[in-house]
Amino acid sequence: MPSLRDLGEFGAIRLLAHGLREGPGVVIGSGDDAAVLRVAPGRDLVVTTDAFVEGRHWLPEWIDPATLGARLAAANLSDVAAMAAVPRWAVLAIGARAGHDAQALATLQEGLARGLADHGATLVGGNLAAVEGGEWLALTLLGEVERGRAWTRSAARPGDLLVVTGFPGRAGAGARLARALGEAARGDEWRALLAAWLRPAPRVAAAQALLATGAVTAAIDVSDGLLGDLAHLCEASGVGAEIRAEPGTADPWLARAADTLGVSAFDLWVGPSDDYELLLAVDPAQRARCEQAAGAAGATLAFIGRFTDARGAIACLEGDGSRRVLGSAGFDHFARG
Amino acid sequence: MPSLRDLGEFGAIRLLAHGLREGPGVVIGSGDDAAVLRVAPGRDLVVTTDAFVEGRHWLPEWIDPATLGARLAAANLSDVAAMAAVPRWAVLAIGARAGHDAQALATLQEGLARGLADHGATLVGGNLAAVEGGEWLALTLLGEVERGRAWTRSAARPGDLLVVTGFPGRAGAGARLARALGEAARGDEWRALLAAWLRPAPRVAAAQALLATGAVTAAIDVSDGLLGDLAHLCEASGVGAEIRAEPGTADPWLARAADTLGVSAFDLWVGPSDDYELLLAVDPAQRARCEQAAGAAGATLAFIGRFTDARGAIACLEGDGSRRVLGSAGFDHFARG
């Protein structure tokens, strides 16, 4: 298969441009200096950017190009979902080595475009740059949200329920197992954890269903880990939180991983993890309505605690009724070692 | 000064978030999962992304952080100008080594934010990722254009005048001199060329002034080199072009660089060069009006030829009246050597 060097820059760009799409709201698509898009009347625009770096956000031996593309789409879709917005358009900047197989790069972009299309968004443009060392991918995703209805991090109230979609911690556990066990991590007993790491499902539909209930007061994307992102939300809202340990320690997948890794299931649950789940503050009067709405949109909700007026303090309630104060523990990409 | 590693990821993000701006149309700025923006009624949205890679798009010993930031802003502003759009908002993805001086990175971002603000745009968000090797910067810029009025590459007509803003080729000549001469390229005799390379002026205001004339039929940003981008525009429009050699060979700055580098001034003029000038197709009846409009907006226009019906053919008219056929010669980032 020809490399990018074999095709030359413009040949490679032509190949990638071929994979860009027409789509709703796309007035002028690829092939010009910029794409032209039409935002629906009465809607605000939402914009986010998230980048993956080879070796850090992905390990080439653990993820095929199409799955990697879809995962980068999920990372950005999750941020748009956390604003209660509908994803619409994206542009992809790629840093690739000249020896990169051109078809593999097109497959990566196709996986990304499909991942976006699954949630109603269109890949409309990009940029291709040559790098010598590690490769990288930077996606910018645009969405639309009804004017004044975007969720923020800053409006959680004491007494609101603390809710997460899906199963936080599983993605981080999958990544740790892959590093610790190597090929053995591909075993069926780790299936749900590897899937959570490699094929996260962004909560776009669930966010729309929950938006319709009017019950959500604040939201954040869990991409740094449950505790780290909870700390961000508490800081922005000027509140504290109490979480119960049980929902985390009761996850059988986390419990098994914890045994093998020699850590606690609770730490896996709340620690560094690229989960792309949503953490929400919810009006306690509307719990049942939220469960129903999320369930209809294919997402499990876990009610794991509540927000308090103890500004900045995050406490954990153990199964035996005891209470301990937690620090925050998100993932620090610049940390030593 | 502390490095990114010293500050930690969230400390570094907090430092960079501090440099983000509020601005017109920014409903929710930094500090949430995504920014929320308001597009003006009757306007379409324009989106472009352009990335710089260390060692390839910038040489750290030749450009300080603030100037580098402004140059990346210019690269993206130029794409938005080429669509006749008004720049509005941007997000910046950064790949930086853990040892990067944190203040230097904040200065880079500040230079970028100022470069954007000079043309009415606001930096509203970003992403920071740790890299091991070469650093990189990927900017996505959003603009607005009156519905249906965006310039494209595809509507040049045979008979239209071929026009460029400023002095294409100078940026490329500056870059080649820096590589060839080292410190000697900082001499005053190369001043205009080094400035064109390091401090390009995007043609945002000139584009708006020219849009108002209604005389421009097609446009492209000259970032790959005059001949390469002319070939792109001809291909998209299904036309050919004839250019006169004289405007290039008569540029005294290019002529001097050509002597020193042992190449022809013409080749410097049309060859690979990150000029961020605009190449335009213009209604011949409106030449004077265009010159006046661009001049009032601070841009020189050079009328360097015309478009023809010889689809895909680009010819050069020499000073002696002879005519030769040119190939395209943009810069190929994946080329060997």
Image: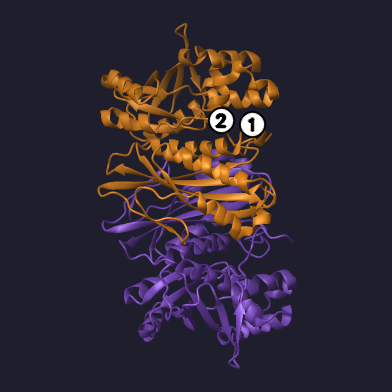
Chain colours: A orange, B purple
**Image quadrant where residue B327 sits:** bottom right
Distance CA(mark 2)–CA(mark 1) = 8 Å
Please name the residue shown 60% across and 58% down the image.
Answer: A11
Q: Quadrant of the C terminus of chain B?
A: bottom right
Give the mark, 2 or 1, whose residue is nearer the N terminus.
Answer: 1
- Disc 1 target residue: A62
| Marks 2/1 same chain | yes
Q: Residues within 10 Å of mark 2 (few under 14, many from 20)?
A: many
Please name the residue shown 65% across and 21% down the image.
Answer: A185
Which numbered circle lies on residue A53?
none
Q: Amino acid at mark 1?
A: Trp
Residue B53: horizontal and vertical position, in percent?
62, 55
Please name the residue shown 67% across and 84% down the image.
Answer: B256
Badge 2 marks a residue whose secondary structure is helix
Q: Which residue occupies the foreground of this view, A278 or A311?
A: A278
- Disc 2 target residue: A198
Question: Position of A206 compared to A274: left or right?
Answer: left
> Is residue A271 visible in this depiction of the protein?
no
Badge 1 marks a residue whose secondary structure is helix
Please name the residue shown 66% across and 70% down the image.
Answer: B175
Q: Which residue occupies the foreground of this view, A27 or B67?
A: A27
Q: Which residue occupies the foreground of this view, B200 or A21?
A: A21
Question: Position of A313 compared to B147: left or right?
Answer: right
Classify B206 as above or below A236.
below
Dots 2, 1 in contact, CB < 8 A = yes
Q: Chain of mark 2?
A: A
Residue A204: horizontal and vertical position, in percent?
39, 33
